[in-house]
Amino acid sequence: MPLIETLAAIVGPTQVLTDAADLAPYLADWRGRYHGAARCIVRPGCAEEVAALVRACAAARVPMVPQGGNTSLCGAATPDAAGEAVVISLARLNRIRALDAANNTITVEAGCTLAAVQQAAAAAGRLFPLSLASQGSCLIGGNLSTNAGGVHVLRYGNTRELTLGLEVVLPSGELWNGLRGLRKDNTGYDLKQLFIGAEGTLGIITAAVLKLFPAPRTTATAWLAIDSPAAALAVLARMQARFGAMLTACELVSGVALALVRRHLPGQTAPLPTTSAWHLLVDVSGADTAPVLLAALEECLGDALAAGEVSDVVIAQTLAQAAHLWALRENISEAQKREGFSIKHDISLPISAIPEFIAATDAALAAAFPGIRCVTFGHIGDGNLHYNQSMLDAADNARLLAGQAAVDRLIHDRVAALGGSISAEHGIGQLKRAELARYRSPVELATMRAIKQALDPLGLMNPGKVL
Amino acid sequence: MPLIETLAAIVGPTQVLTDAADLAPYLADWRGRYHGAARCIVRPGCAEEVAALVRACAAARVPMVPQGGNTSLCGAATPDAAGEAVVISLARLNRIRALDAANNTITVEAGCTLAAVQQAAAAAGRLFPLSLASQGSCLIGGNLSTNAGGVHVLRYGNTRELTLGLEVVLPSGELWNGLRGLRKDNTGYDLKQLFIGAEGTLGIITAAVLKLFPAPRTTATAWLAIDSPAAALAVLARMQARFGAMLTACELVSGVALALVRRHLPGQTAPLPTTSAWHLLVDVSGADTAPVLLAALEECLGDALAAGEVSDVVIAQTLAQAAHLWALRENISEAQKREGFSIKHDISLPISAIPEFIAATDAALAAAFPGIRCVTFGHIGDGNLHYNQSMLDAADNARLLAGQAAVDRLIHDRVAALGGSISAEHGIGQLKRAELARYRSPVELATMRAIKQALDPLGLMNPGKVL
């Protein structure tokens, strides 16, 4: 029987897509940088169907590309151009299987949107803290496969830290039920860690047990004008000492980034009358009443003002004001897109190295590429910068594009020299595969390949990604 | 050249121990349950020496047993009886390599005691939160290799969650430098996860980058009398809602366990005049002043009293009182030891399943083994119980010992039926290897073996442990 008929027998003929028009949305990535081809798209409805599909593809020696919400920024979910692969969409595995409020866990299928998981938690008076720009369309299986980060990592950790158990279809087509909802479990190798962040190259995650948290009663938000990244570190240390885990977000926004938002999104007025080279957006949250939390935040930021770490402060007095401050941060990517072409870098550094990195790398880029502009922002509390480059004069962007490899090299070399990472939260996918091979040691790459070979000896799971 | 001479050439002749008297402390486990034999003990002084030792042993096809403070409760660090193995002691790798206060990280070698790591952090105004009874003698490499837990997991996570980077000598003798101090790093498979909790079966951890935290300014401690484990869950949920991450410990102590402490450690007076079937010991900590934190704790526990969740409360008013309350909890193991023989179980459950588990398993044990006594205590905030059995009349303990396998089976079957774990924080070692094979699925065991085979194809790293 031809493979497509075998697949149709598993999922039903309507869940196997072969028309070019039906395939198109699955074959290009969200940013439009990658375009692939596939034999077909299959849309299984349960984990057992995923397992049967994998067995069928493995028997036919056909590569498989698992796909969630197709929001990867690195082309991790797009098949290659060969047209040999079967794309397995997880979108129909979208059940919330269980929620255990006393255990603070939720068991979800890979095809739930992140927003659906958040909403199910909220309906039970709980918080699922993973929060990303794409949360309305990204699927939790993709979040798991890329170990997604976002704005609350500072308090709650990456997706990896939010995961207690997984259900995975292995490359053999066997279904591994590791859906344990335990905070402590030292029984052999912690296999779930292998699949989290593996971008579908070691198997297909079909479900997960995730941690929930009590929903904070109160959140207080402030926008700070600061002189430098070094001042940002001083404020971060002060706020961590004062608020501990109640400091739930600490975002750095350069004046350049803020100006782009104000230019392209006219409703976004600046929160402070002063212009400043740098800004911080901070959230503190907890179970205190709003007056108590606001008073504590005011006192702490007053001390930061008195110490000269901060030049101006605005504390949101209403939810609408807080939402306005957050919109400034969240609209940076959209403003950049409207501005035109940019080269993006999703990097992380030891937090202590950030001031040195920004000063030295900005200067080196300016020297090597006159007229370049750095749009710098990100999750400074996690050491994660989005460090993007375009030309001050958009007419010069074609020249910058031609030099992209040199820009990447300059930046990534400096990241590596300071002990940083060339992919903090976006992953490797197709985009950074060559860079990974360059910046990781031979022994580390060989060990990764040994793991890949051990679990996927036929090399059929999402080939051409990561390694 | 004979292997021992090769090893002596690497570490120096004084660091290779071959006399029986010198070997003895390395060949028996801390609880005296396991006694092994070895060709020699080698005591390398740096990671490069460890790598050279591993290459030499691998070339000679000689098994290796890495050993830290030899405080395993499962025989994980004791060689088998064959006498073929070389025991590699990590004790001389005891440098604090670096501390980065702004990055909240410390880089330590495997041979540092846990207490030394805690002290180095404290000297920099930081907290390293891992805390165990054996912290003065256990080594951090052992803590990493067993993914150690302890009393602060509720707030800060297991050792795994505290680890940002590792340096590991692979079974090939290659040295992998994964000492990255990054909160976010999505660059391929997260290899460090494999070695954490692998009990030395996949390689030898030589150093780590660990997370530090701002030292909390204030801690408030309370002892609560409660009627049942269900009441403990109600108090836990109430305190998590009120204090969030400021709830740093939540320990369950049965009346039976408390009575043992009072009997065998006469200085340990009970904190409350009432006798109660169950107790909770709780810590809240943060940056509030002591009066503010105490007032919040009093209010929260007052509400718990009013709601009938708690029958009596004492809040420590001094550090000495807090230490006294904690000594009651920490002396349970010592009191049990003085009482005589007991069968120990280190289990975890979904927190919501704990009341059902205790009630049903206590009853089933009483029916199957008349005269049995359960000493139940543990980290209820993590779902981790220490659930130990002995006979009410110590004269009957020989009969219980003869029935240990049946006791284990009854308990572990119930743990498994409720989705729990047969080893929450102690690991597998030699002790629970057969139990692991029983309670984990064939596909999970096969995947673990595939990992072992991929990294240690000669099977020389700590053989006879875990798998």
Image (tube, coloured by chain):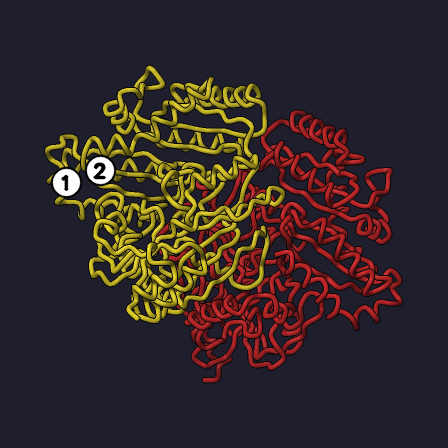
Chain colours: A red, B yellow
Residue B55 higher or lower than B432, as above or below: below
Mark 2 is surrounded, within 10 Å at the Cα level, by few (under 14), some (14 to 19) or many (20 or more) other residues, namely many
Residue nearest the observer in this picture, A289 or B297: B297
In the rendered image, the residue lying farthest to the bottom is A1
Quadrant in the picture for residue A279: top right
Q: Is residue A76 visible?
A: no
Q: Position of residue B28 (x, y in %)?
A: 24, 49
Disc on res. B400 = 1
Residue extending farthest to the front is: B13
Q: Label 2: which residue?
A: B389
Q: Which mark is residue A55?
A: none
x and y percentages locating residue B104 in the rendered image: 58, 43
Instruction: Indicate the amino acid at tag 1.
Output: Leu
Q: Chain of mark 1?
A: B
From this viewpoint, is residue A130 visible?
yes
**Residue A399 to residue B204: above or below:** below
The amino acid pointed to by label 2 is: Gln
Give residue B203's position: percent from left, percent from top.
40, 61
Give the secondary structure at mark 2. Answer: strand
- In the image, are marks 1 and 2 on the same chain? yes
The residues tagged by marks 1 and 2 sit, at their Cα atoms, a distance apart of: 9 Å
Q: Tags 1 and 2 in contact by the CB under 8 Å rule?
A: yes
Q: How many marks?
A: 2
Quadrant of the image containing the C terminus of chain A: bottom right
Along the polypeptide, which appears first: circle 1 or circle 2? 2
